[in-house]
Image (cartoon, grey):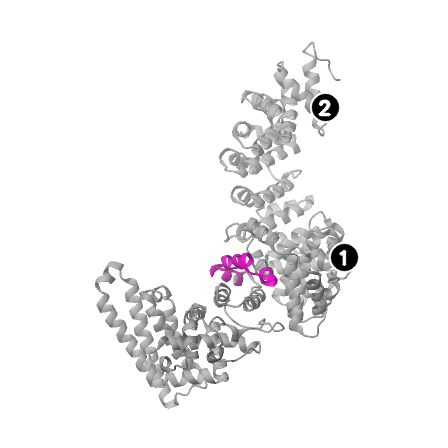
């Protein structure tokens, strides 16, 4: 243990300087790889170094590592111009450090140890386990494995030629870093071989130069699901041109199994995983390799940190062929197989096929029964993957949803939510939310099974995004579920997410609060928690979908709620219409209109608070959506309110409203016709023929209730114009 801790401390100090290690044409990398080789041998419980020499070697190793770290720090802090002048001194210092490491290598008889590692499989396994221990002890040196693998990729061809020629001279000198790096790298990949019963044939047995990875070929029936390799190494394997197609498929399968949390998926992104995955979908000839890579890409479609890839993702998805009938039906048999690993692979493949959009194909071959069976009685991994696969199978199909409910999916999901692991609970919550999104009857069934207290408990404990999602769906147009959610105390947690949640959490929390606000009794509770200003802030700064959800929640909260004073809400809304940018002006205008439509006193207050001037400016200069929203607000403000009508006319609204009626979209014409109906009674002007014509056309089209407004406007005009007969 002292060996591990002492060496680990020294190596970690160096690892933080990895950018500096990459300089100087690779010499620093070679030195570092040589030190890693020595460290692995020191950490190996079977290493041949005598006990009485061990303490001395460890002290030498720590001294050399510290000297190397000090050299790197000194080199890194220098300006590039200074480094040019100091090159000879720095090179002399570096060579002195290399000499120290070579002396240490001789003391340990590294060459002998490396020959033992090459010949004896058990020693190779111990070295691989040591690497796994390193990876678990400190994440700062995870990149070591990727660097070792990269070095291995570069030196493999040279080593293969030497092995075939029978030449051992290149590997017989202690200072030959390339050889040691290659052998060390092989110990990393040999752990994959051991887990999958792979061939242990030596480099000398490779028949052809092109077959560089033949000894790592994984049999079709084997997987590497239990392998504990770090994400950077997996991405390096996927990116390398030397990696065989089958190893890439198995690596992607491992990647899916490992990346069940957002944090681990972030590692994929940070290691250029998105580009690597896209390249695989584009170029791979293997069906399941493309399918697995596509599923991995689906993690990042709505990720805040990833540039929008949805369009490219859809194109890639559509480019993957439809699975054959044999490929799909074989999964049903594998889900019933006695081998748990086969079942797990089949579950992942079902999930990936659902991502591809083949849910209906899976339903047609009878996949439902074995999936729900594994959800209820499978292993922990089976339950996890079955729940996510079933959630993906639901898709947008009410029919699929009903089939799963009748097959008994809800009770095992509730059981998993009650007593499963953290990840099982999250996935079960996600799937229940998918079920609840489809119809009121299913929402009620989930609520009656006791899901709501469990989901609210998870929300309070972890603020998990799927808990918010499930509550938003369960509360939609379902009063009993809404009451249960409020009684469990979810409102405070939902409002808190408006303040500190992620992008998706804020959007879903706003939607859930809007659903709960359909019950008048809940509106006061939501307001007391400070939701109004947070929703207004979201309306001002959020994404498009967040703004839509915020508008929805605010409209539900303020319309018909006499306890929310108009001043507290109208003033910030008017300011957003005046100074906001983009869609917040549109949404603020819509909410102003809905406030005005809901209460006569609020119409007066909105007019007095200066909303009319910025609304008319928006009517003249805004986008199509903003003009429609402004016309709608003016329509509502002019209804039964003489003061607002005169103010609207004085601000010059008549001309832009006429333009909308004549040239606008259908929505704009509808709102403009309503506003003109109210304004004409005040204006008492003769409207020109070019305005009468669209009014008549709009009337004949019979568009909703606005036809009545048009007819009334024309009737009013008819009383003062000889050639028009009043309609009423």
Asked if residue 339 is among those painted magenta in the image, a careful observer would answer: no
- Whether residue 188 is situated above or below residue 305 in the rendered picture: below
* Residue 607 visible here: yes
Tag shown at residue 90: none
Question: What residue sits right under mark 2 in the picture?
Answer: 700
Of labels 1 and 2, earlier in sequence is 1
Q: Who is closer to the viewer here, 289 or 335?
A: 289
Q: Secondary structure at mark 2?
A: helix
* Residue 420 visible here: no
* Residue pictured at 63% horizontal, 73% vertical: 221
For the residues labelled 1 and 2, say whether their Cβ atoms are less than 8 Å apart.
no
Q: What segment carries the magenta color?
A: 264-292
The picture places residue 489, in percent across and down from the top left corner, at: 64, 55
Asked whether, in this view, residue 473 is left or right of residue 225, the answer is right
Question: What residue sits right under mark 1 in the picture?
Answer: 403
Q: CA distance from mark 1 to mark 2?
A: 46 Å
Asked if residue 265 is among those painted magenta in the image, a careful observer would answer: yes
Q: Secondary structure at mark 1?
A: helix
């Amino acid at each position: 243990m002292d060996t591990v801790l002492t060496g680990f401390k020294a190596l970690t100090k160096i690892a933080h300087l990895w950018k500096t290690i990459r300089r100087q044409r690779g010499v620093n990398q070679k030195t570092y790889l040589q030190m890693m080789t020595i460290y692995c041998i020191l950490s190996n419980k079977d290493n041949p170094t005598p006990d009485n020499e061990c303490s001395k070697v460890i002290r030498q190793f720590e001294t050399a590592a510290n000297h190397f770290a000090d050299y790197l720090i000194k080199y890194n802090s220098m300006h590039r111009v200074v480094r040019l002048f100091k090159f000879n001194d720095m090179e002399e210092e570096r060579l002195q450090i290399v000499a120290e490491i070579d002396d240490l290598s001789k003391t340990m008889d590294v060459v002998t140890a490396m020959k033992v590692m090459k010949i004896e499989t058990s020693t190779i396994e111990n070295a691989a386990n040591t690497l796994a221990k390193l990876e678990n002890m400190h994440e700062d040196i995870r990149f070591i494995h990727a660097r070792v693998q990269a070095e291995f990729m570069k030196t493999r061809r040279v080593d293969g030629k030497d092995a075939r020629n029978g030449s051992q001279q290149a590997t017989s000198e202690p200072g030959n870093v390339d050889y040691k790096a290659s052998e060390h790298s092989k110990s990393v990949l040999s752990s994959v071989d051991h887990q999958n019963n792979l061939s242990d044939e030596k480099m000398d047995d490779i028949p052809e130069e092109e077959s560089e990875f033949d000894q790592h070929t994984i049999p079709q029936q084997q997987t590497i699901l239990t392998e504990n390799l770090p994400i950077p190494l997996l991405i390096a394997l996927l990116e390398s041109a030397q990696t065989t197609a089958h190893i890439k498929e198995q690596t992607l399968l491992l990647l899916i199994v490992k990346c069940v949390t957002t944090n681990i998926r972030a590692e994929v992104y940070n290691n250029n995983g998105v580009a690597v995955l896209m390249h695989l979908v584009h170029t791979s000839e293997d069906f399941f390799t493309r399918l697995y890579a596509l599923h991995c890409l689906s993690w990042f479609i709505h990720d805040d940190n990833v540039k929008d890839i949805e369009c490219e993702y859809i194109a890639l998805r559509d480019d993957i062929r439809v699975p054959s009938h044999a490929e799909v039906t074989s999964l049903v048999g594998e889900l019933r197989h006695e081998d748990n690993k086969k079942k797990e692979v089949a579950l992942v493949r079902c999930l990936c096929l659902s991502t591809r959009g083949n849910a209906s194909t899976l339903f047609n071959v009878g996949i439902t029964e074995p999936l729900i069976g594994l959800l209820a009685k499978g292993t922990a991994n089976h339950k996890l993957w079955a729940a996510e696969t079933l959630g993906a199978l639901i898709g947008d199909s009410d029919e699929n949803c009903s089939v799963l409910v009748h097959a008994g999916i809800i009770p095992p999901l509730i059981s998993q939510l009650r007593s499963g692991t953290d990840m099982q609970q999250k996935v079960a919550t996600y799937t229940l939310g998918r079920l609840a999104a489809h119809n009121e009857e299913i929402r009620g069934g989930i609520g009656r099974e006791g899901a709501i207290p469990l989901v609210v408990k998870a929300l309070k404990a972890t603020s998990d995004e799927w808990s918010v999602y499930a509550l938003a769906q369960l509360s939609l147009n379902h009063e009993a579920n809404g009451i249960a959610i409020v009684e469990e105390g979810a409102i405070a947690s939902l409002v808190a997410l408006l303040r500190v949640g992620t992008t998706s959490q804020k959007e879903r929390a706003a939607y859930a609060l809007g659903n709960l606000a359909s019950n008048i009794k809940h509106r006061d509770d939501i307001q007391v928690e400070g939701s109004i200003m947070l929703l207004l802030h979201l309306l001002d700064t959020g994404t498009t979908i967040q703004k839509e959800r915020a508008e929805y929640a605010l409209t539900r909260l303020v319309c018909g709620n006499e306890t929310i004073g108009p001043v507290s809400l109208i003033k910030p809304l008017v300011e957003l219409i005046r100074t906001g940018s983009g869609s917040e002006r549109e949404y603020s205008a819509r909410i102003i209109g809905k406030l005005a439509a809901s209460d006569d006193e609020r119409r007066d207050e909105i007019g007095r608070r200066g909303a009319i001037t910025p609304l008319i400016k928006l009517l003249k200069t805004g986008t199509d959506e903003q003009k429609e929203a402004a016309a709608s607000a003016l329509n509502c403000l002019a209804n039964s309110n003489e003061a607002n009508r005169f103010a609207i006319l004085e601000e010059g609204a008549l001309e832009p409203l006429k333009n909308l009626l004549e040239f606008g979209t259908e929505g704009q014409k509808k709102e403009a016709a309503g506003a003109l109906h109210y304004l004409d009674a005040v204006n008492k002007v003769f409207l020109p023929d070019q305005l009468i014509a669209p009014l008549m056309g709009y009337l004949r089209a019979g568009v909703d209730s606005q036809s009545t407004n048009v007819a009334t406007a024309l009737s009013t005009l008819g009383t003062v114009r000889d050639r028009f007969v009043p309609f009423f």
